[in-house]
Amino acid sequence: MQTRSRRQREILDFIIEFVDSHGYEPSYQQIARHCGLSSKGGVARHIESLEKKGLLKRNRDAGKFHLEIYPESLIKNHICEVEWLEDLTAGGGSNQDPLFVPRSLLGFRAPKEMRGMLVPDNAMSGEHILEGDIALIERKSFARDGDCVAARLNRNRLTLGRYFRKGSAVEIRPANDNYEPVRAQADKVEILGLYRGLLRRA
């Protein structure tokens, strides 16, 4: 399942609140006006994306589309927001839209225990983790040899790879022969968490 953009979250929230207040769904024109969109076509594209993500359904009746909104309780039970890992090399903080993921990807872990990491390169392509993917990271400050970890090097650079301890040093190994292992003293490497899953944007 793809993530929801901030605009799609705004549209979905407005539709739910409108239906709760009026007993019927708003028109595309009302949605566009409320959300500051310039055209109904823009609304239609967001509605189509929300439908693909299983959050609402368009039903055609007498040549017109009607929106079927799934209960907010169902959405909350199946979708949760996960914070991003901070990329300090990008000026501090993340400019990404909020990250919403299926709860089923988290297993028994609470959303607050997880973070999203935008994969910076193809160093882990041998394990089918590609640049631009979103890695789901369970917050942990330690790792065992062979664990796939998210780590911060020298207090700013984020990296993803297999963790190995060698005396007072740490090695983060890629899964791509075109990339060199990252080696540093243990006090220069901050383990942020363990890799638990992947989201790939369309």
Image (cartoon, helix red, strand yellow):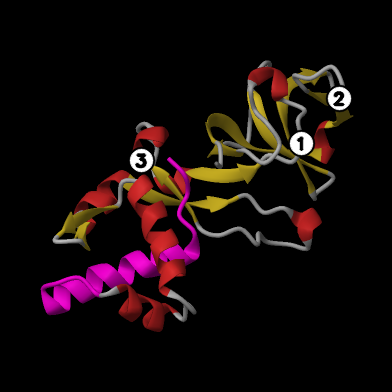
How many marks the image carries: the answer is 3
Residue 166 or 51: which is nearer the viewer? 51
Q: Are marks 1 and 2 in contact (CB under 8 Å)?
A: yes
Q: Amino acid at mark 3?
A: Arg
On-image quarter of the C terminus: top right
Q: Residue at x 65, y 19 (%)?
A: 127
Q: Are marks 1 and 3 in contact (CB under 8 Å)?
A: no
Residue 123 or 139: which is nearer the viewer? 123
Q: In terms of secondary structure, where does tag 1 sit? A: loop
**Is residue 86 in view?**
yes
Residue 103 bears which disc, if any?
3
Which residue extends farthest front?
Answer: 63
- Residue range of the region highlighted in magenta in the rendering: 1-26
Residue 179 bears which disc, if any?
2
* Whole-percent x, y for residue 114 in the image: 50, 43
Q: Residue at x 65, y 28 (%)?
A: 129
Q: Amino acid at mark 2?
A: Tyr
* Whole-percent x, y for residue 171 in the image: 81, 23
* Res 148 → quadrant: top right
Q: Earlier in the sequence, mark 3 or mark 2?
A: 3
> What residue is pinned by disc 1?
121
Q: Is residue 130 magenta?
A: no
Q: Earlier in the sequence, mark 1 or mark 2?
A: 1
Looking at the image, is 106 positioned above or below residue 156?
above
Q: Amino acid at mark 1?
A: Asp
As measured in the structure, the alpha-carbon distance from the residue carrying label 3 to the one carrying label 2 is 33 Å
